[in-house]
Amino acid sequence: MIRIPTRHETFAYHGDFDWGGIAIAAAVHERVGFLPWRFDAASYRAIPSSAQLSGPVRPTLWDPELSVAMERRGVRVEEELVLAELIAALAPKGRGAHYGPGICVGINPVVR
């Protein structure tokens, strides 16, 4: 199910840190805009991974430093590596960071 945020909401987005995930995020950013949710250069650098990043470099307009960091580090990070942390962050107040009314969170769907 896809839910487009209303004009009174902010869409918080997280996706895969690979060039395909960046392409999806760029399309979403262009069409509806979003607030990057743990989807920036600092978040990318903080996640341990050794999976090789391949493919053409793509710009990250929401955080230009992200594409630079990805190109330099050369490592991809799939959402599944941080999924438990993302879900925990959505817990009600007192159990982690919480987005209140007016925040619509999008986690890139996994299709297999």
Image (cartoon, grey):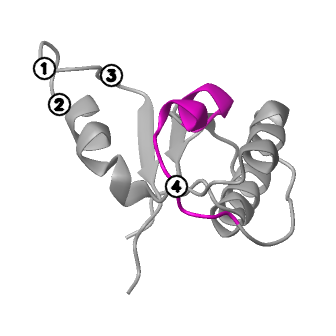
Task: Please identify, in this view, whether the residue under mark 2 or under mark 4 is nearer the observer.
Answer: 4
Which amino acid, mark 4? Answer: Ser
Q: Quadrant of residue 26?
A: bottom right
Which amino acid, mark 1? Answer: Arg
Question: What whole-number distance in Å separates the C-alpha atoms at marks 3 and 4?
Answer: 35 Å
Predominant secondary structure, magenta span:
loop
Which label number is shown at residue 77? none
| Membership of 103 in magenta stretch | no
Q: Which residue is identified by label 1?
A: 95
Q: Which residue is identified by label 2?
A: 91
Task: Please identify, in this view, whether the residue under mark 1 or under mark 4 is nearer the observer.
Answer: 4
Q: Which residue is identified by label 4?
A: 50
Which amino acid, mark 3? Answer: Gly
Residue at image position (63%, 54%) is 75
Q: Of label 3 and label 2, which has the lower sequence position?
A: 2
Question: What whole-number distance in Å separates the C-alpha atoms at marks 3 and 2?
Answer: 11 Å
Q: Secondary structure at mark 4?
A: loop
Q: Which residue is identified by label 3?
A: 100
* Relative side of 76 to 38, left or right: right
Q: Of label 1 and label 4, which has the lower sequence position?
A: 4
Which amino acid, mark 2? Answer: Ala
Q: Quadrant of the C terminus?
A: bottom left
